[in-house]
Image: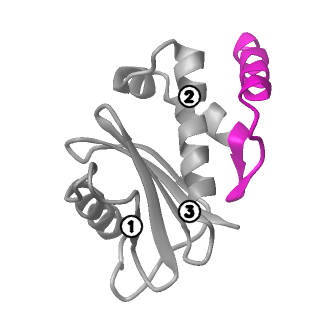
Amino acid sequence: MAIQFILCFNKQGVLRIVRWYEKIVSAEYKKTEDLIAQIYRLISSRDHKHQSNFVELSAATKLVYKRYAGLYFVMGVDKNDEEAIYLANIHLFVETLDSFFGNVCELDIVFNFYKVYMVLDEMFLGGEIQEVSKEILLERISVLDRLE
C-alpha cells in the first residue's frame, strides 16, 4: 500500500494541504499545477450524495476523497489498493484534527498549518500509514505541541 499524495482543497479549489510522497509526472501532467487542477475538477464535479468517494485519475492512480463541510480531503493511491482503508484514514485524520483544534475549520488549517502537517506526519510517513490510533496520535501531538 502506498499513498502517492495527500491534498486538501476548499470549495473554491484553493489548496490548503499538500504532501507529495511520489513524483507524479506524465505527458498529460507536465506541471503539478495541471495535476492539481485536474484533481479538483474531478472531485468537485461529482454528486457526493449519489456517487462513491473513489475515482480513477490515471492508469496507475485512483483518488480517494471525502468532503467535510467546505473542505475536500484527497489521497492519491495505487490503483490496486483497497479504497476503504484510505477512506478510514482520511476520516481518522479529520477526527484527530477536530479533537486537537476543537471543531476544526478552514481557518485553523490556514493559521496553524504547521500543526496540521505535524498531525499528518505522525499519521503518514513516506507514503505509508504509520499510526491508526486516535488516542496515541493525540498524545504524541500534545507532547510535540508543548515543546513549542
Task: Name the side, left or right, on which 83 lies relative to 105.
Answer: right
Residue 29 coordinates in the image, percent (x, y): 35, 78
Which residue is situated farthest in the front direction here?
A: 50
Q: Label 2 near label 1: C-beta < 8 Å?
A: no
Q: In what quadrant of the picture does the C terminus appear?
A: top right
Q: In what quadrant of the picture does the N terminus appear?
A: bottom right
Q: Is residue 48 above or below residue 62?
A: above
Amino acid, disc 2: Glu
Q: Reading the chain from its start, which is encountered first: label 1 or label 3?
A: 1
Residue 73 coordinates in the image, percent (x, y): 43, 46
- For the residues labelled 3 and 2, the Cα–Cα distance comes to 18 Å
Amino acid, disc 3: Glu
Q: Residue at x 45, y 20 (%)?
A: 104
The residue carrying mark 1 is 32
The residue carrying mark 3 is 83
Is residue 115 visible in this depiction of the protein? no
Q: Is residue 10 above or below residue 24?
A: above
Q: Reading the chain from its start, which is encountered first: label 3 or label 2?
A: 3
User: Secondary structure under badge 2?
Assistant: helix
Task: Choose top left, top right, bottom left or bottom right for residue 99.
Answer: top right
Disc 3 residue crowd, few under 14, some 14–19, many 20+, Cα 10 Å = some
The residue carrying mark 2 is 95
Q: Label 2 near label 3: C-beta < 8 Å?
A: no
Q: Reading the chain from its start, which is encountered first: label 1 or label 2?
A: 1
User: Secondary structure under badge 3?
Assistant: helix
Amino acid, disc 1: Thr
Is residue 79 visible in this depiction of the protein? yes
Determine if the magenta segment contains residue 21: no
* Range of residues picked out in magenta: 122-148
